[in-house]
Amino acid sequence: MTDASLAGLVARLPHLRLLTEPGDLEHYGRDWTRRWTPAPLAIALPADVAEVQGIVRWANEQGVAVVPSGGRTGLSGGAVAANGELVLSLERMNRVLGFDAVDRTLTVQAGMTLHAVHEAAKEHGLIYPVDFAARGSCSIGGNIATNAGGIRVIRYGNTREWIAGLTVVAGNGELLQLNRGLIKNSSGYDLRQLMIGSEGTLGVVVEATLRLTDPAPPSQVMLLALPNMDALMEVFALFRSRLTLQAFEFFTDVALRHVLAHGAQRAIDGDHPYYVVTEFDADESSQDAALAAFEVGLDHGWISDGVIAQSEAQAAALWRVREGITESLAPHKPYKNDISLRISALPDFLHEIQGLLGREYPHFEVVWFGHIGDGNLHINVLRPEHLSDGDFIAQCELVTKLLADTLQRHGGSISAEHGIGLVKRAYLGSTRSEAEIALMRGVKQVFDPKGLLNPGKLFG
Ligand code: 2HG
Ligand code: ZN
């Protein structure tokens, strides 16, 4: 790529903010995976939709690959630019465009952080309920690109459920208004839903109309200690049958050790192999129901100990233990798995996979945590200090192949909520059939004939 062609972009969009300093290329060229060396051509920071269209049209004329970019908190390399791509950061497009009290929708630009979306919804007495730990830095556009899930899926579903309309710049620069906020729309293919989870390979989401809802009723947060993995599923079934759950998350003693070393506070004494953080609606009757469920769990030997938060500060402290895990593991350069199963398939799968990981990773520290109530497990493998990044990843990939085969047998998915990106593209075939992948490639061809939108992501 020559400077002359960037000059062409500047001539076309004289007010476009473009960054080419090495520090900027590094900052905007990578996400939280830290596995690839960032090497983008330049960073474009459009101020409006017209500039996004101009960039995509220019990229088509010049044959330049474009990486749409949000908060880059992704864990699958979906926003990595390591091959001379132009990074198209939506960072400056971060405003609320409108609120409609009758439709209960909030229309926003794609670069808003999830936290800012939460705050904007709150100003109108409503909530946007999708939530997870990266809320302060991830962007709503990125959430849409991966159909992000998080800690409230059990109650509210994934991002997909909350998108009433999308404005998208397609691969040829054309502007698409998808679904326009309609609740019912039986008029052919739902291209909005196709865009959600497409990881920036079909178009650039520039605006979104989000559905809002009433704030959740008052809730209580409980931390439980469990004696074994089977108890996890028993306690989940017990609590779900007696309470209205807002979240049901688990982690192991290994995760706890890391998060405590990283500043979280211990809430339960003693050594226990598994923990659950659960939040549930808490009117007076459900408080009694929670205590009754707890007693039943104790009697059956499924629960060893537990605490119920007595204040908002204590609830936040309990959540910090769960939400701080990713950050506490980051210094150990973890190899991440983000797998999904039907809840009914979990018990058999867990038994099989525990054996497999124990066999294949005898010398590695393996950290389990995640959204057990959604059938979504995060298995992080920590890099031993004596291994180079390359050797470590190579060894992990061998096990991922076995994991993918096991998932396939149990009807699961190699990515629940992080996306395929670069990290999991070799395993797409374990989750999607050949026929499905061929159709997906066909769709990609229709939306992005020159293959310039986020090339290499999703497909190997
Ligand atoms: C979470 O559930 C995130 O905390 C990150 O999805 C998971 O770090 C991970 O593997
Ligand atoms: Zn997660």
Image: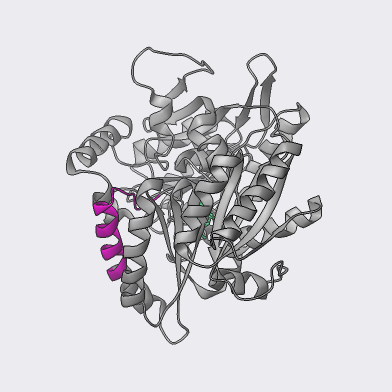
Nearest the viewer among 129 and 304 is 304
Residue 83: image quadrant is bottom left
Q: Which residues are magenta?
A: 398-415
Measuring 57% from the left and 46% from the top, which residue is drawn there? Answer: 239
| 176 sits to left or right of 300 | left
> Could you say where residue 333 lies in the image, as x and y percent from the top left?
49, 72
Q: Nearer the viewer, residue 84 or 344?
A: 344
Residue 241 position in % (x across, y down): 54, 41
Q: Position of residue 77 (x, y in %)?
A: 43, 56
Verify whether residue 408 appears in magenta. yes
Q: Residue furthest bottom?
A: 386
Q: Main secondary structure of the magenta part?
A: helix
Q: Is residue 90 above or below residue 268?
A: above
- Extreme residue toward the front, this view: 299
Residue at image location 40% in from the left, 55% down from the top: 84
Residue 449's place in the image compared with 124, above or below, is: below
Coloured how? one colour
In this rendering, the answer to whether 260 lies above or below 121 is: below
Q: At which x and y percent is residue 206?
A: 53, 32
**Residue 30 in view of the camera:** no
